[in-house]
């Protein structure tokens, strides 16, 4: 779940609904995250605040990279 005002992403277990982890921190560069999708072991988080996408490892929650678009 992307948290637009809190600048973090929350992961829940699909099987149980239990909290798995909260992903946050300055290295992720979340700026008003509003949508996310996953595929092939990666999660992409769209950031409305600066026209970027944060790519995260689905298995570990580690930052892969931040992709910046044109403003």
Image: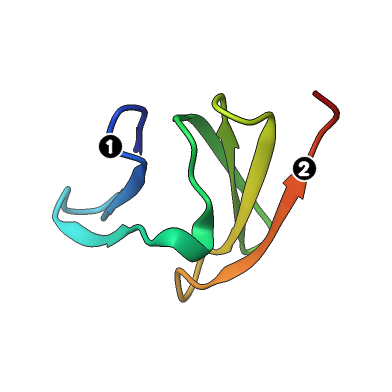
Q: Does dot 2 land on a helix, a strand or a loop?
A: strand
Horizontal and vertical percent for residue 65? 69, 62
Crowd around label 1: few <14 · some 14–19 · many ≥20 (10 Å): few
Q: Label 1, on which residue?
A: 6
Q: Is residue 42 left or right of residue 61?
A: right
| Residue ID at (61%, 50%) | 54
Q: Label 2, on which residue?
A: 68
Q: Is residue 41 left or right of residue 20?
A: right
Q: Quadrant of the rendered structure where residue 51 is?
A: top right
Quadrant of image for the C terminus: top right
Crowd around label 2: few <14 · some 14–19 · many ≥20 (10 Å): few
| Residue ID at (44%, 60%) | 26
Toward the viewer: 21 or 68?
68
33 relative to 8, above or below: above
Horizontal and vertical percent for residue 41? 62, 64
Toward the viewer: 50 or 24?
50
Q: Quadrant of the rendered structure where residue 1 is?
A: top left
Horizontal and vertical percent for residue 14? 30, 49
Q: Earlier in the sequence, mark 2 or mark 1?
A: 1
| Residue ID at (66%, 42%) | 53
Q: Does dot 1 land on a helix, a strand or a loop?
A: loop
2 relative to 63, above or below: above
């Amino acid at each position: 779940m992307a948290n637009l005002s809190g600048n973090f992403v929350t992961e829940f277990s699909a099987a149980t609904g239990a909290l798995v982890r909260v992903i946050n921190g300055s290295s992720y560069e979340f700026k008003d995250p509003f949508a996310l999708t996953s595929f092939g072991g990666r999660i992409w988080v769209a950031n409305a605040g600066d026209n970027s996408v944060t790519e995260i490892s689905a298995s570990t929650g580690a930052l892969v990279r931040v992709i910046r678009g044109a403003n």
